Amino acid sequence: MASFLNVTSPPFFSSRTTLSTSPPPNITAQLSQFKKGWCWKLKCMPSSGPSQETESEPPETAPSPSNSASLMSSSSVSTYNWCAGLGGVGFLETAYLTFLKLTNSDAFCPIGGGNCGDVLSSDYAVVFGVPLPLIGMISYGLVAALGLQLSGKKLPFGIDESNGRLLLLGCTTSMAAASGYFLYMLSTKFSGTSCSYCLLSAFLSSSLFFITLKDFGLEEIQKFLGLQLCIASLVIFSLNTSYATLRPASSSLADIDLEYFTTEITTPSSPFAISLARHLQSIGAKMYGAFWCSHCQEQKQIFGKEAAELLNYVECFPDGFRKGSKMIKACADAKLEGFPTWVINGQVLSGDQELSELAKVSGFKIEESNQPS
């Protein structure tokens, strides 16, 4: 007997030529294998039900570590930019004060029973023989440079970012400690004195300190707390040591008792100066000053004796100067920022002025025969 299986069609569509009523055993096994294979194929085929039209939603993914690191890096860059900016402002301020200190020039700042020049010219403006503004300029410059370098990820001398951040924290900690100490000295040794530069420097240094702290996490802050306390203690100890040899506080500015006095004007007045003084008087221009102010005396000397007597001069401390002294109401209402101060037609001029400038601002017509020499 022989049988034939067409393998090009499914087994249940196969055509057979049978010579006996029962197939041989080997043919039965082959049919069984084909049926199993075909059923397996049917089971693997996707069903045609409604589930085909439903798309599976993508699984939710948690933020990757790289994204978190990117956010932290962006926050650090912002911190470094702030440090660079505030450090730059502090550098400019202390550079100006250093110039004034080295040239013995007067600082121009708000007045309140004293001025910034009193603080800048005092013994407390020097630490171990080095001008305090110069130390501040170096400190602010270092912070600004570190901020720029950390922001650009390019630190010099092979310093990595971790050590750079630690160095920045040490600098801002020492500056904040020094500023706190100086504010204490300002309130005790210079009572009644207003120093806008001192307050600005304290604001900048404390801001830099807290901005740097914010860049460190709580765990890191706790880790370096001991180091910060050591730095602050060392700064305060050094300042105390430097000031230990200064004269007692009884001779400081806070205890000065200065009686009112007048200074004689010795220079003669030119015709132009007399005409200008009369013009300034006629338009209500005023010159505010203080009896101890050297620049006020120089301004009067420029006008000369005769012309100075014609000026509308306002003395802000007619009863002398002592601890707690305040300017008279006219000067306080004018919101003066220094002496002398001119108020001409609503325009404020600070410091002593040339006669030609006063003539220009006041609208005084300069005659050919009366031009200033």
Image (tube, rainbow, N blue to C red):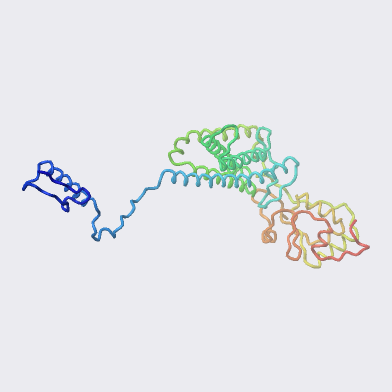
Quadrant containing the C terminus is bottom right
Q: Residue furthest left?
A: 21
- Write down the quadrant of residue 69 in the picture: top left
- Write down the quadrant of residue 99 in the picture: top right
Indicate the position of residue 48 as horizontal and vertical percent values. 24, 59
Residue 316 appears in the figure: yes
Indicate the position of residue 249 as horizontal and vertical percent values. 64, 39
In terms of depth relative to the viewer, which is nearer, 336 or 261? Answer: 336
Residue visible at 61% across and 39% down? 142
Indicate the position of residue 343 as horizontal and vertical percent values. 74, 61
Quadrant containing the N terminus is top left
Q: Residue furthest right?
A: 369
> As drawn, is 91 to the left or to the right of 71?
right
Residue visible at 74% across and 51% down? 260
Residue 181 appears in the figure: no
In terms of depth relative to the viewer, which is nearer, 179 or 299? Answer: 179
Vertical side of 159 occupied by 275: above or below: below
Vertical side of 1 occupied by 46: above or below: below
Vertical side of 104 occupied by 265: above or below: below
Q: Residue furthest bottom?
A: 282
In terms of depth relative to the viewer, which is nearer, 83 or 373? Answer: 83
Residue visible at 72% across and 41% down? 101
In terms of depth relative to the viewer, which is nearer, 194 or 105? Answer: 105
